[in-house]
Amino acid sequence: MLFTEPQSARILVIDDDEYVRRLLRRLLGPVGYTVEEASTAEEGMLQVRADPPDLVLLDLHLPDRSGHEVLEAIRADPATRLLPVVMLTGMATAAEKMRAQAEGVTDFIAKPFSQEELLPRVRALVMLKLFADEHEHAEHVILTLARTIDARDPYTAGHSGRVAEYADHIAVRMGLDAAARNDMRRGALFHDLGKIVIPDAILRKPGALTADERAIIEEHPVVGHELLSPMKTMRRTLPVVYHHHERLDGSGYPEGISGAAIPMTVRIVTIADIFDALTTDRAYRGALRVDTAFEILTEGVTKNWWDRDAVALLRAVVDEIGLSASGGAGGLAAG
């Protein structure tokens, strides 16, 4: 649950020095913060996992393991990856501080500390957590909306999740770094968000679309882009949402960009999107055989529409996960 005032936040102090814990209680408690305590790394991690606080004040040197290990565990868990962690340092070396920075520490506070130094920094970091929580809540709402849009048509239920899974498998084989993969995967999950404006009569039409209906369909990348662009943290996902119907020869939409102007993450999602559309039932046709889908993709490669490497790597993915050559791809976990 989001807190409405920074002073109502919960702060976990992980420090084996009882004097330090008592001092922090005395400094933070009177202004309204709830101060929770742990004297060991193990105890602290149990509390973080059970009920993540809004801020962790972490001693670098603990009796059972180092503060570095606690910080690494917090950053490795998706549930706490955005949790602000302040390292309490006394005799920390420059190397220890550099290591903590590499591991994702939010800030340092040197011991001994004063109320004048501590309170403004704690308040700022608790506000940071508030903003992160609000962002994650907003992103969850958008993701739920995207899945709801998929579910409007029983033929496309789970489509965006499968596209994200296929794309991620391709990206791993292509050697994309973790940050690019994460942005690409989020973009894949949101790639059809703009279909919210498409009437059901068009979205679920069993026959061929008219030119006017096709023009409405082709607006969905623009609408998705407009919906997501106010969120600063979504900006790296926007190319996937906006350009996933572009072609390498410039014949795609909405802008007709071509060649090197189309990022690799977009090319990957495009192939994943087309493959899942071909190999699942749609209102206007049944699912195509996997081999038939790859014949269509390969033909597109020869026309310079789609990325050759992405198609080849998707073929390897499909072979590895064992999709039937005669069946559709609807059985892939939507993830």
Image (cartoon, rainbow, N blue to C red):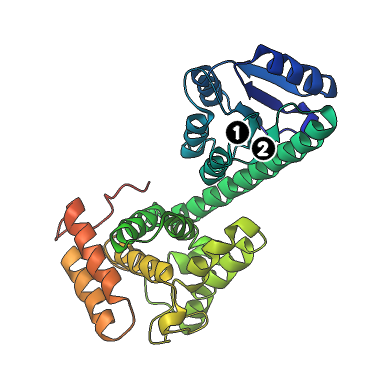
Q: Disc 1, disc 2: CB below 8 Å?
A: yes
Residue type beneath disc 2: Phe
Badge 1 marks a residue whose secondary structure is loop
| Residue 70 drawn above or below residue 331 | above
Q: Is residue 17 left or right of residue 240?
A: right
Label whose residue precedes the other's in the sequence (1 or 2): 1
Mark 2 Cα-neighbour bin, 10 Å: few <14, some 14–19, many ≥20: some
Q: Is residue 63 left or right of residue 304?
A: right
Query: In what element is the residue under mark 2?
Result: strand
Q: Residue at x 31, y 85 (%)?
A: 304
Q: Give the camera-side residue of 265 and 306.
A: 265
Residue 91 sits in which quadrant?
top right
Crowdedness near tag 1: few (<14), some (14–19) or many (≥20) residues, C-alpha within 10 Å: few
Q: Amino acid at mark 1?
A: Ala
- Figure check: 254 above or below 38: below
Mark 1 vs mark 2: in front: 1
**Residue 281 visible in the snapshot:** no
Residue ID at (60%, 45%): 136
Q: Position of residue 268 (x, y in %)?
A: 36, 67
Distance in Å between CA atoms under marks 1 and 2: 10 Å
Residue picked out by circle 1: 92
Query: Residue 125: horizontal and vertical position, in percent?
Result: 71, 39
Image point (37%, 61%), residue name: 176
Which of 79 and 176 lies nearest the eye of the viewer? 176
Q: Which residue is mark 2?
A: 108
The quadrant where residue 306 appears: bottom left
**Image x and y of residue 175, in percent:** 33, 61
